[in-house]
Image (cartoon, coloured by chain):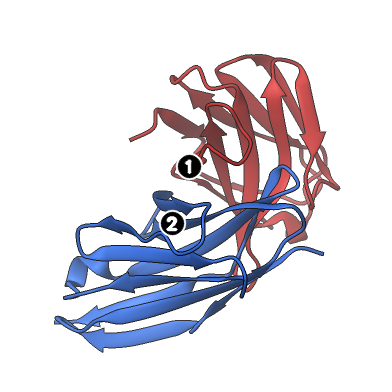
C-alpha cells in the first residue's frame, strides 16, 4: 500500500525563524512529489519535484527531493504569520496522488 | 486561482437521504477528482474522471457514485448517506493527468450527516 508520512505533525515557531518540514514516501511506480499549502479552504499548489537534488525555490520557500532515500523537505526561511497553515505532501504513482496527513505550522508574531 | 466552483459549500442532512455534490470548472481540463479530507487521514481519493463519461474508482469509493456528462461538471452522489460520510469533500482538476501536471483544488464542501 502506498504511504506518505510527514513530520513533525505540528510546529510552533516565532516570526523570523527558519523551519524544515519533512516528507517520506513509499509509493509504487513513483513519478513525482508535490507540496501544497492549506489555509482555511483549498490546498494551493507550491512545488512539484521529479528529479533528485534539484532544488525548487519560490521566494522564501524551497524544496528538494532525494529519490534514493525516498524523502523530501520543504524549507521556509524568515517565516511570517502568513505562513501559518497546514503543509501537505503528496506523491504521484500508479496514476494517483497519495497524501500525507500534513504538518500544521503556526507562526507566533 | 483555478476556476473551480463546488456547491453547496455546506450541507447538513440526515442518515439515509441521497446527497449530490457538484464540481464545476471553467478551465476545460480533462481530469477531475473527488477527495474527502478527514482528521488523521489526509486527503483520500474517492473517484476520478479522465473524460466525459469516463470515470474510475479511488481508494475509498464504497458508498459513492459519480457522473460526468459534460467536460465542466463532475457530480458526486451519496445514494444513502451514512454518518461515516461526514467529511469535507474537495474537487480537483488537472489538465492532462499523469505525473507531469499538478492538481488544483476547489474550496471544498463541508458535509454533515446526522
**Residue A42 in sight from this viewpoint:** no
Q: Nearer the viewer, residue B73 or B99?
A: B99
Q: Colour of chain B?
A: red
**Residue A106 in view (yes/no):** yes
Near-viewer residue (B39 or A31) = A31
Q: Toward which corner of the image does residue B50 lie, by quadrant?
A: top right
- The label shown at residue B105 is 1
Q: Which of labels 1 and 2 is toward the front?
A: 2
Q: Residue at the spot x=74%, y=24% of the render?
A: B67
Q: Pick the quarter of the image with the N terminus of chain A.
A: bottom right
Residue, x 39% and y 28% (percent of image)?
Answer: B3
Q: Which mark is residue A36?
A: 2
Number of residue marks:
2
For residue B7, above or below residue B105: above
Residue at 24%, 79% (x, y): give it.
A107
Q: Secondary structure at mark 1?
A: strand
Q: Secondary structure at mark 2?
A: strand
| Quadrant occupied by the C terminus of chain A | bottom left
Instruction: Calculate the distance from the C-alpha at mark 1 to the C-alpha at mark 2.
Output: 10 Å
Dot 1: within a 10 Å radius of its alpha carbon, few (fewer than 14), some, or many (20 or more) residues?
many
Q: Is A76 placed above or below B51 here?
A: below
Whether the residues at callouts 1 and 2 have beta carbons within 8 Å, the answer is yes
How far across and down, in percent of the image, does residue A69 sit? 61, 75
User: According to the colouring, which chain is blue?
Assistant: A
Query: Mark 2, residues whose alpha carbon is within 10 Å: few (<14), some, or many (≥20)?
Result: many
Residue B62 locus on image (x, y percent): 86, 48
Which label sits on residue B37? none
The x and y percentages for residue A3 are: 71, 68
Q: Are marks 1 and 2 on the same chain?
A: no
Amino acid at each position: 500500500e502506498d504511504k506518505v508520512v510527514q513530520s513533525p505533525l505540528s510546529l510552533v515557531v516565532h516570526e523570523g525563524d527558519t523551519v524544515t518540514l519533512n516528507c517520506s514516501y513509499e509509493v509504487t511506480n513513483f513519478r513525482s512529489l508535490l507540496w501544497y499549502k492549506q489555509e482555511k479552504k483549498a490546498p494551493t499548489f507550491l512545488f512539484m519535484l521529479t528529479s533528485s537534488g534539484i532544488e525548487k525555490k519560490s521566494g522564501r520557500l524551497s524544496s528538494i527531493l532525494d529519490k534514493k532515500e525516498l524523502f523530501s523537505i520543504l524549507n521556509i526561511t524568515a517565516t511570517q504569520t502568513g505562513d501559518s497553515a497546514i503543509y501537505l505532501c503528496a506523491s504521484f504513482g500508479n496514476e494517483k496522488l497519495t497524501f500525507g496527513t500534513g504538518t500544521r505550522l503556526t507562526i507566533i508574531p | 486561482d483555478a476556476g473551480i466552483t463546488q456547491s453547496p459549500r455546506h450541507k447538513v442532512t440526515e442518515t439515509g437521504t441521497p446527497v449530490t455534490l457538484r464540481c464545476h470548472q471553467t478551465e476545460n481540463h480533462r481530469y477531475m477528482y473527488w477527495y474527502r479530507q478527514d482528521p488523521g487521514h489526509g486527503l483520500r481519493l474517492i473517484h476520478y474522471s479522465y473524460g466525459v463519461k469516463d470515470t474510475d474508482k479511488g481508494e475509498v469509493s464504497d458508498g459513492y457514485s459519480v457522473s460526468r456528462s459534460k467536460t465542466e461538471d463532475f457530480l458526486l452522489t451519496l445514494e444513502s448517506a451514512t454518518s461515516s460520510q461526514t467529511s469535507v469533500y474537495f474537487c480537483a482538476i488537472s489538465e492532462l493527468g499523469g505525473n507531469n501536471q499538478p492538481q488544483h483544488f476547489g474550496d471544498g464542501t463541508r458535509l454533515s450527516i446526522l
